[in-house]
Image (spheres, helix red, strand yellow):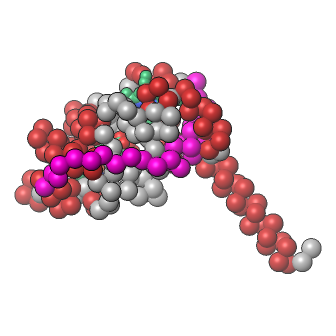
């Protein structure tokens, strides 16, 4: 075998391994039939309390499914849904949803939410959300910061309340619990409305 051929096969071998680690979106699409009733055919849910999954980072989605199953993120409905899934199923589902395009909501501008999102509030000890979730809300897959842009405001607001109350405890080092504990109700509403239109 020529040296270049060895390189080509080594590269193809790595690509196959990575594709597997990332999950198979076609298998994921078949499994996603189980989820469509709440999250929509392509992960753009119609019901504001059910989060959009479309366009979310696959590694974040897989983490959430594993943690619903282990009840590190305890939530009755999703724990029941994740219970029968293998890690491979979770990766396949995550690969499918990650490839879909998330719908961004339209609505009035939310200047207070926008300001808090981009600059935080130093006096109150609230960091800028954009520091981790990015100026466009696309997050950072390597760091485990989820995409927020276009998410239903009702779900985002609920998530912030859950972090604040400690009902959701699966955030690394309690990062989101520390931040949400400093947010008031109206700030959560403003942030959630702004995030739903962010792109
Ligand atoms: C009966 C409705 C219902 C069904 C069916 C359902 N889900 Fe969910 N899902 C929810 C709700 C409600 C939440 C929000 C839970 C919370 O408030 O913490 C959620 C949250 C999630 C999240 C977390 C999203 C995030 O942004 O953190 C993922 C991932 C998820 N579901 C995947 C799935 C998958 C995959 C399936 C199919 C195997 C599925 N769900 C089926 C209702 C449902
Ligand atoms: C230091 C980094 C950091 C900052 C700053 C930060 N977040 Fe987060 N956020 C995270 C991490 C990490 C998670 C994912 C936790 C997990 O793995 O479940 C997260 C998750 C979330 C979620 C849940 C998403 C979902 O789909 O369930 C919301 C909503 C959120 N953050 C909103 C905000 C808002 C609003 C701000 C600003 C007030 C903010 N975050 C600031 C790191 C951060």
Q: In which quadrant will I find the C terminus?
A: bottom left
Q: In which quadrant will I find the N terminus?
A: bottom right
Number of numbered labels in the structure image: 0
Q: Would you say residue 85 sits in the magenta stretch? A: yes
Question: Residue 156 placed where, x, y %?
Answer: 28, 40
Is residue 177 rendered to the left or right of residue 26?
Answer: left
Quadrant hosting ligand 1? top left
Q: Would you say residue 87 sits in the magenta stretch? A: yes
Asked whether 44 or 120 is in front, the reply is 44
User: In this rendering, does residue 135 appear at all?
Assistant: yes
Q: Identify the residue at image location x=21%, y=61%.
A: 118
Is residue 10 rendered to the left or right of residue 157?
Answer: right
Query: Height in image: 105 above or below 29?
Result: below
Query: Height in image: 30 above or below 59?
Result: above
Q: Identify the residue at image location x=46%, y=33%.
A: 40
Query: Height in image: 162 above or below 196?
Result: above
Question: Which residues are drawn in magenta?
Answer: 84-111
The answer to which image quadrant residue 18 occupies is bottom right
Asked whether 105 or 129 is in front, the reply is 105
Q: Identify the residue at image location x=56%, y=39%.
A: 93
Q: Residue furthest bottom?
A: 3
Question: Residue 94 placed where, x, y %?
Answer: 54, 42
């Amino acid at each position: 075998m020529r040296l270049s051929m060895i390189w080509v096969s080594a590269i193809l071998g790595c690509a196959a391994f990575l594709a597997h680690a990332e999950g198979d979106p076609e298998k994921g699409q078949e499994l996603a039939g189980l989820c469509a009733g709440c999250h929509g055919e392509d992960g753009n849910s119609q019901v504001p309390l059910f989060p959009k999954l479309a366009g979310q980072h696959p590694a974040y989605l897989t983490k959430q499914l594993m943690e619903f199953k282990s009840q590190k993120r305890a939530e009755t409905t999703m724990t029941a849904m994740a219970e029968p899934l293998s890690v491979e199923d979770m990766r396949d589902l995550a690969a499918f949803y990650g490839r879909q395009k998330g719908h961004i909501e339209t609505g009035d501008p939310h200047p207070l939410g926008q300001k808090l999102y981009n600059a935080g509030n130093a006096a109150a000890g609230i960091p800028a959300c954009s520091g981790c979730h990015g100026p466009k809300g696309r997050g950072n897959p390597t760091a485990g910061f989820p995409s927020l842009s276009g998410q239903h405001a009702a779900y985002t607001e609920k998530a912030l309340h859950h972090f604040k109350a400690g009902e959701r405890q699966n955030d690394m080092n309690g990062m989101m619990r520390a931040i949400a504990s400093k947010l008031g109700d109206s700030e959560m509403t403003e942030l959630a409305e702004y995030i739903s239109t962010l792109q």
